[in-house]
């Protein structure tokens, strides 16, 4: 018989996106799909982070990853936009400014 401990009171066993965060991310994803730029996405919910990855094609690395890491809330901000090569494009405390580089790219795609 194995004993599984209860999660600690202040520490969730899994990090996730709340409804407003996921709505904002999926809205951006939908607009990028409509512009013909993204075709697939993946969501990873882990113990330390929740990650939304957007792909140009299903069989490659994600073009962008939107990461939520509550452990960094007091330091650099819990939101990060990570590029295809793994570089941090933008980091912050709020989701809106972190998504701004992708929003600007969407404006350029629509104008072309």
Image (cartoon, rainbow, N blue to C red):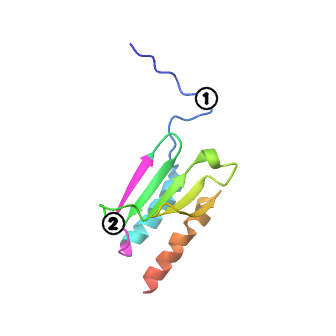
| Residue at x 59%, y 60% (from the top left corner) | 95
Which portion, as a residue range, is magenta?
34-44
| Residue at x 46%, y 86% (from the top left corner) | 111
Tally of marks: 2
Q: Which residue lies furthest to the bottom in this view?
A: 112
59 and 19: which is toward the camera: 59
Percent from the top left, x then y, of residue 63?
Answer: 42, 65
Q: Is residue 43 magenta?
A: yes
Percent from the top left, x then y, of residue 42?
Answer: 38, 54
21 and 89: which is toward the camera: 89
Which label number is shown at residue 39? 2
Where is the N terminus found, in terms of image quarters? top left
User: Picture quarter containing residue 12?
Assistant: top right
Could you tell whether 24 is left or right of 58 in the image?
right
Q: Relative to 3, is 105 above or below? A: below
Residue designated by label 1 = 9
| Residue at x 30%, y 61% (from the top left corner) | 58
Mark 1 / mark 2, whichever is N-terminal: 1
Q: Which residue lies furthest to the right in this view?
A: 74
Percent from the top left, x then y, of residue 112?
Answer: 42, 87
Q: Is residue 59 magenta?
A: no
| Residue at x 54%, y 27% (from the top left corner) | 7
Q: Relative to 17, is 91 above or below? A: below
Which label number is shown at residue 49? none
User: Picture quarter containing residue 10?
Assistant: top right
Could you tell whether 77 is left or right of 4 in the image?
right
User: Picture quarter containing residue 61?
Assistant: bottom left
46 and 86: which is toward the camera: 86
User: Dot 1 lies on which element?
Assistant: loop
User: Dot 2 lies on which element?
Assistant: loop
- Label 2 environment density (alpha carbons within 10 Å; few <14, some 14–19, many ≥20): some
């Amino acid at each position: 018989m194995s004993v599984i401990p209860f999660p600690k009171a202040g520490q969730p066993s899994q990090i996730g996106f709340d409804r407003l965060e996921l709505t904002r991310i999926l809205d951006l994803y939908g607009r990028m799909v409509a512009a013909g730029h993204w075709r697939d996405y993946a969501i990873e919910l882990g113990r330390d982070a929740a990650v939304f990855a957007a792909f140009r094609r299903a069989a490659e690395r994600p073009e962008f990853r939107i990461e939520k890491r509550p452990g960094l809330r007091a330091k650099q901000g819990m939101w990060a936009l990570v590029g295809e090569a793994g570089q941090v494009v933008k980091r912050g405390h709020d989701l809106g400014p972190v998504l701004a580089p992708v929003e600007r790219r969407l404006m350029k795609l629509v104008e072309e």
